[in-house]
Amino acid sequence: MAATRKVIISCAITGSIHTPTMSPHLPITPDQIAQSAIEAAQAGAAIVHLHAREPQTGCPTPNPEVFFQFLPRIKEASDVVINITTGGGHNMTVDQRLAAPLKAKPEMCSLNMGSMNFGLYPALTRFSNWKHDWEPRYLETTRDFIFRNTFKDIETILQKLGDECGTRFEFECYDIGHLYTLHHFLERKLIKPPLFVQSIFGILGGIGADIENLAHMKRIADKLFGHDYLWSILAAGRFQTSFVTAGATMGGNVRVGLEDSLYLGKGELAHSNADPVRKIRGILEALSLEIATPDDARRMLALKGRHHVAF
């Protein structure tokens, strides 16, 4: 793994997993997403990871027009690295998922490294009064849903965004096999180091949030990528803080935010994305770890720079 003395904090602002009923603090509108991302950057996030939602209902949307209501505002107010999803939301086609990134040509995009079951339906038992009719239907569909990311899909994204737009990637790995898929593309020279490998734990259908899995994921990544990668860790829900802290002590970078967990602590909702950023920053600094600035992250990840995007 590439050595670094600085820790990159990524913040995932809204995602496509949680629904409006689950928290009144989940950013929905372009105004809310922009403000939340700016606050996260001010709190210490070097990277913000962005999805878009329909402003009236909060339903995930791939619509570039919605993205472009908040992307320029974040760029104008902050030098934070902007990372746009290519995962989108459930039942979006690859073309839909690429619509906003191809128009924006950002410094970074996420890229999921395999197709998988992606179960959100257990959340149905935790709520009864839904703000919008789409929410329970959306969660129920994940009982019989495969999040598609075929080899061809990955090749297409690497070519259209990577080769043609100069965008680099947060390679999202939900299981050990995803690391081997990433290595396959590295061997084919379709991607170039340094790789930013995001290990994801605790999603139903992916690898579990178990410390033994954390160590195993790092061990295999070290074996496959050596000094050609930077490691980052995220964990869903209640595992967020403990897991990313453990990962940081093992040499990793960290990702937090309301996409990954709505809670700041047991029974305590986070009121903003700045809340988990401030929390993990305090923990990292208490461990004598230095926090990377956005420009540090650009150097560490060999990004093209904020002035070479299309927004």
Image (cartoon, grey):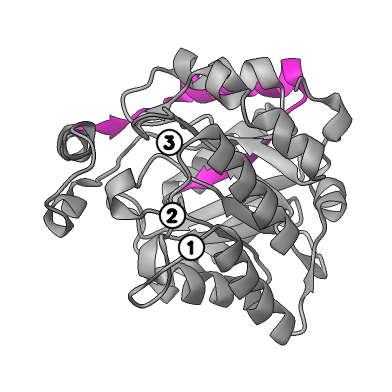
CA–CA distance in space, label 1 to label 3: 33 Å
* Crowd around label 1: few <14 · some 14–19 · many ≥20 (10 Å): some
Q: Is residue 243 visible?
A: yes
Q: Position of residue 169 (x, y in %)?
A: 66, 37
Give the foreground label among 2 and 3.
2
Q: Quadrant of the N terminus?
A: bottom right
Mark earlier in primary sequence (2, 1): 2
> Relative to 279, does residue 133 appear above or below in the rendering?
above
* Crowd around label 3: few <14 · some 14–19 · many ≥20 (10 Å): many
Q: Position of residue 45 (x, y in %)?
A: 70, 57
> Relative to 155, does residue 168 appear above or below in the rendering?
below
**Residue at the location (77% across, 19% down)?**
310
Mark earlier in primary sequence (2, 3): 2
Q: Are marks 2 and 1 in contact (CB under 8 Å)?
A: yes
Q: Which mark is residue 25?
A: 2
* Crowd around label 2: few <14 · some 14–19 · many ≥20 (10 Å): some
> Relative to 115, does residue 22 appear above or below in the rendering?
below
Left or right: residue 194 versus residue 126 is right
Residue holding disc 3:
114
Q: Position of residue 145 (x, y in %)?
A: 22, 32
Q: Quadrant of residue 5?
A: bottom right
Between 247 and 95, the one lying in front of the other is 95
**Residue at the location (77% across, 36% down)?**
75
Between 28 and 113, the one lying in front of the other is 28
Q: Quadrant of the C terminus?
A: top right
Q: Position of residue 251 (x, y in %)?
A: 68, 71
Between 192 and 86, the one lying in front of the other is 86
Callout 3 secondary element: loop
Mark earlier in primary sequence (1, 3): 3
Residue holding disc 1:
271
Magenta residues, start to end: 145-173
Number of numbered discs? 3
